[in-house]
Image (cartoon, rainbow, N blue to C red):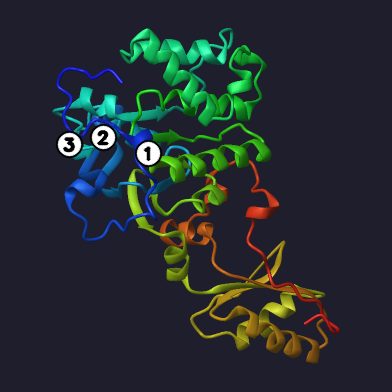
Amino acid sequence: MQRHAGDDDLAPTALRTAAPAGPPSPQDLPDSAYAISTRGLVKSYPGPEGTTTHAVSGLDLDVARGETFAFLGPNGAGKSTTISMLCALARPTSGHATVAGADVLTQPQTVRRRVGMLFQHSAVDPDLTAEQNLHIHARLYGLARREARRRAAEVLDTAGLTDRRRSPVRTLSGGMRRRLEIARQLLHAPGLLFLDEPTTGLDPHARAQVWEHLRALREAHGSTLFVTTHYLEEAENCDRLAIIDRGRLVAQGTPLALKAGIGDDRVVLRTSDDEAAQRVVQGMAPPDRDVTVDAGGVSLRVPGGSTWIPRLCGALEARGIAVNAASATPPTLDDVFFHHTGRSLDAAQPGRAPAPPSARPTAAAAKSGGGR
């Protein structure tokens, strides 16, 4: 690979390194172990009538090298603004950020050379072939003609598109096109890939293919992946995630730890008389627990939800209220989002594609009359 003037020993080597044994913990790591580190990062814009709009407010974030990290939040939360600052495409209003070992304020060109960036919208020429698109991009990165051809062939193989290398991009499926765009970001061998909403607009099958490709990339090359998304099931694929809402970081950790922090299961009962059932369940529930009724039935949150189902069903049936169905569901990432923001991410994201069945949480469903 052709070196640029001013490159140092931290030049990208992602495609030449072995895969890590597992994602490193971001805690107690030296600064050199972080692919991304920010402190007090702010991006503000002038608002109406002399006001100031804060798109990102005081972001403190550490992402370890080799980690798959999700930035979760609804549209307008500040995800794309953050990623633009981390890629040195937008200048922070204040704060500090180091990305791939370079400062985004004082070394923006170095940051851009060391990272790959997948934008939300397609940036490939549909009238050129897959190979031609890659060759042009490699040349723009300064690779010599022979090296550009070699790297294009390598990343096409990585993306599983070698047999479509001479196909015009317009003839590729949505999933293939997205894999081609990811391959394009690998031409200059970055150790850190930013993927802004990588599967927006794809059908569930194509989305699954893209994530399979990303996992293979991480395992084969040890790349750090920073993914912005509003799809809950995609965040589950990541080692850690951070929840951002209205420009502020409200929670971060592993998906399992964040859900465990909520603790309570959601118990839902569908009965012959939900209004009457609500009064019975409220009398049995701990005093600090609200029992609500909506189109889905009677619901409450309690620890060990499955152990409550037989007791609740027995009490309702003793009062002549038939239980048609009962379920206990462990906390989800949407519950985590609601806990920290007071809103459901599903509700904050109108028109978003539903999760595929394999990604939805399973419920311990029971029917009255022997189904419990």
* Mark 3 vs 1: CB contact within 8 A: no
Residue 118, by quadrant, is top left
**N-term-proximal mark, 3 vs 1:** 1
User: Mark 2 — residue?
Assistant: 43
**Looking at the image, which residue is at 53% across and 57% down?**
334
Estimate the spatial distance between the alpha carbons at disc 2 and disc 3, rounded to whole Å.
7 Å
* Mark 1 vs 2: CB contact within 8 A: yes
Relative side of 171 to 221, left or right: right
Q: Amino acid at mark 1?
A: Gly
Relative side of 86 to 237, left or right: left
Q: Give the class, few, some or many, for how many residues have Cα within 10 Å of label 2's Cα (few <14, many ≥20).
A: many
**N-term-proximal mark, 2 vs 3:** 2
User: Mark 3 — residue?
Assistant: 94
Q: Is 131 situated above or below 309? A: above
Relative side of 343 to 223, left or right: right
Q: Secondary structure at mark 2?
A: strand
**Quadrant in which the C terminus appears:** bottom right
Estimate the spatial distance between the alpha carbons at disc 3 and disc 1, rounded to whole Å.
15 Å
User: Mark 1 — residue?
Assistant: 78
Q: Which mark is residue 165?
A: none
Residue 369 visible to the viewer = yes
**Looking at the image, which residue is at 37% across and 44% down?**
18
Q: Secondary structure at mark 1?
A: loop
Estimate the spatial distance between the alpha carbons at disc 1 and disc 2, rounded to whole Å.
9 Å
Q: Amino acid at mark 2?
A: Lys
Please provide percent x and percent y for residue 67: 37, 49
Residue 82, by quadrant, is top left
